[in-house]
Image: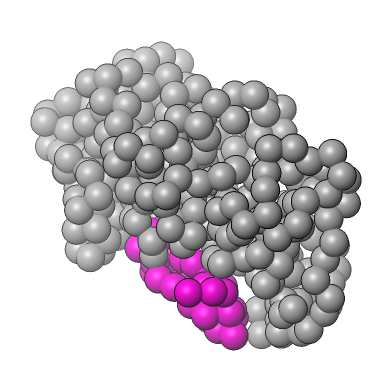
Amino acid sequence: MRKVEAGSLTSIRDYALVECAIPQPGAGEVVVRVAACGVGYVDALVALGRYQVKPPLPHTPGQEVGGWVHAVGEGVAGLRVGERVMASAAGGFADYARAAAGSVVTIPPAMTFAQAAGFRINYLTALHGLADRAVLRPGERLLVLGAAGGVGLATIQVGRLLGARVIAAASSAEKRAFALEHGADAVLDTTVEGWRDRLKAACGGQAPNVVFDPVCGPLFEAAFRSLGWGGRHMVVGFAGGPIPALPANLPLMKGAALTGVDVRQFQLFQPEETAAHLRTLLDWVADGRLVPPVGRCFALPDHAEALEFALSGQGLGKTVLILEP
């Protein structure tokens, strides 16, 4: 089989296609024949050694795949060879990838492999962040920053399904149009000067109740200051660069909360709640209420370009690596 591999985390251009044997499943494992693998901003950071958790070497990127069950290990029940699945699998830039059986979930007929490959992390982040951490209520105003990225777009769609009025902030007219196309009620730009006034206008003269922030960039403090009484600001990631700080008196003055959303640890410490959220999300896909858009697609030989594109922040939705049509 083919896989992408590098012996260092120095440069994306160090990654190359190599050939190796198809892996065999251990006890409690499943080998998936990969049709598509998601490519996110975090995947690119990990590939360059810039993420807080560095991978062992040699490293094969990719952590979310869609494909078919190829083989099951001892003790695995409820999964059959040939079933269409999504899985969390380290080393997804490969024709075959090994995954813990607990992360392998069958997908509905309505879902494509490309959709499945960009689904689990982004949509679990959105639902966990909004339902569990923000405790979003129907009718509340939800501001989504970085709205055209994979997790931002998922949050727009999930927020609408939870009954919120969604205001999407994005840096270009193309990204704002994309957010409107996929469910945002209103959009605004990210130019700092006068931004709070434009946000208030987009909220109908009121304040947002919840901020969902995977960027934490130049608008971080302005967004928090714009919250109404009892507002909640979700810290999801730091795609904006240096990690910002917030004056400690602001949460007190607004009765507001600054709350972290870490889907990796949510899955680790709350597996039952994770499974319940994933069932809810896939039920929405099955009945047509949730249609995950697919971002730009790359072929496996173009893996370096895919990682660079994911790192650039230029994409609309989740970037995907296609291994089999």
From this view, report whether residue 228 is shown above or below residue 181: above
Colour setting? one colour
Left/right of residue 182 with respect to residue 46 in the rendered view: left
Q: Position of residue 132 (x, y in %)?
A: 50, 22
**What residue is at 70 percent from the left and 60 percent from the top?**
70
Q: Nearer the viewer, residue 225 or 265?
A: 265
Q: Residue at x 85, y 68 (%)?
A: 57
The answer to whether residue 108 of the structure is visible from this angle is yes
The percent coordinates of residue 37 (x first, y second) are 57, 64
Q: Position of residue 181 (x, y in %)?
A: 20, 53
Residue 141, percent from left and from top: 25, 28
Q: Quadrant of residue 6?
A: bottom right
Viewed as shown, does residue 277 lie left or right of 53?
Answer: left
Quadrant location of the N terminus?
bottom right
Extent of the magenta region: 296-325
Q: Does residue 14 appear in the picture of this structure?
A: no
State which quadrant residue 252 falls in: top left
Report the side of 151 relative to 36 (left or right). left
Q: Residue at x 60, y 37 (%)?
A: 262
Q: In the displayed structure, would residue 126 be above or below residue 40?
A: above
Which residue: 35% across, 56% down? 293
In magenta segment, residue 26: no
Given residues 190 and 5, the one toward you in this image is 5
Q: Is residue 79 above or below residue 65?
A: above
Front residue of 71 and 325:
71
